[in-house]
Image (cartoon, grey):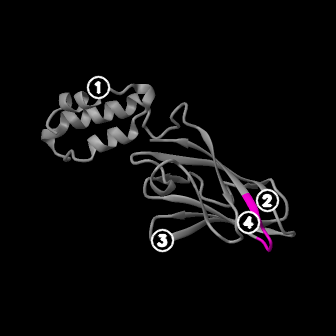
Amino acid sequence: MGSDRKFFEQLNTLKVEDAPGDSIQALSNPVHLQESNKSVLDAIIKVNKAILRDGKHIPGTASIKTGTATESGTRTTIDFGGTDGAPKKGEVWGISAMTIESVAGGSGDATYEVFVVDGSEIQSVVKRAQTTPPVHLNQELEYPHGLEIDENIILQFSATRSSLSSAKIQVYASRLY
């Protein structure tokens, strides 16, 4: 891409309110980190700041994502809108709160677990056994403070209990990039 002018020309149909993270990322990826590209690198920084892709919560992006496990012990994906439920390319989401909202079927404790999956590895980030919802998963004690996911990570949920028919999780998240 040689100049900031060319970079801006490719974005001229987009508005700040569109928060076009995937478009900016696609245009930014092929830019080499070298002195001759200083003007386009500066333009990328300016555009990212203008649409609030600066690591802070992007206004108007907070939402509650949900997932429902319908079979005991089976992981279900919490959909963030991209490939296989991960965030869209160029997006990063910060997880602020997770709550098990409901559980049906069976009796006694259910074991609730949230995972991050990168395609080849699965990591449990929180696991809690409790009888009745709501179950507030504690960010300070049970899962990493500042949990963030991007296009390479899928957030999944499972609930395990004999005769479980469904369990629903709510995830409060905001776009950071």
Residue at mark 4 to residue at mark 1: CA–CA distance? 48 Å
From the top left corner, tell me how far across and down residue 15 is, in percent. Answer: 39, 25
Q: Which residue is mark 2?
A: 103
| Residue at (70, 68) in percent of width and height | 71
Give the structural element (helix, strand or loop) at label 2: strand
Which mark is in front, 3 or 1? Answer: 1
**Secondary structure under the numbered disc 3 in the rendered image:** loop
| Label 4 sits on residue | 128
What segment carries the magenta color?
Answer: 161-167
The type of residue carrying mark 4 is Arg
Q: Earlier in the sequence, mark 4 or mark 2?
A: 2
Element carrying mark 4: strand
Dot 2, crowdedness within 10 Å: few (<14), some or many (≥20)? Answer: many
**Left or right of 44, for residue 124:** right
Disc 4 or 3, which lies upstream in sequence? 3
Label of residue 121 in the image: 3
Q: Are marks 3 and 2 in contact (CB under 8 Å)?
A: no
Cα–Cα span, label 4 and label 2: 14 Å
Name the amino acid type tagged 1.
Asn
Q: Is residue 134 above or below residue 76?
A: above
Work out how far the residue at label 1 is from the one at label 2, CA to CA, in angstroms.
48 Å
**Of label 1 and label 2, which has the lower sequence position?**
1
Q: Residue at x 59, y 61 (%)?
A: 156
Alpha carbon distance from label 3 to label 2: 27 Å
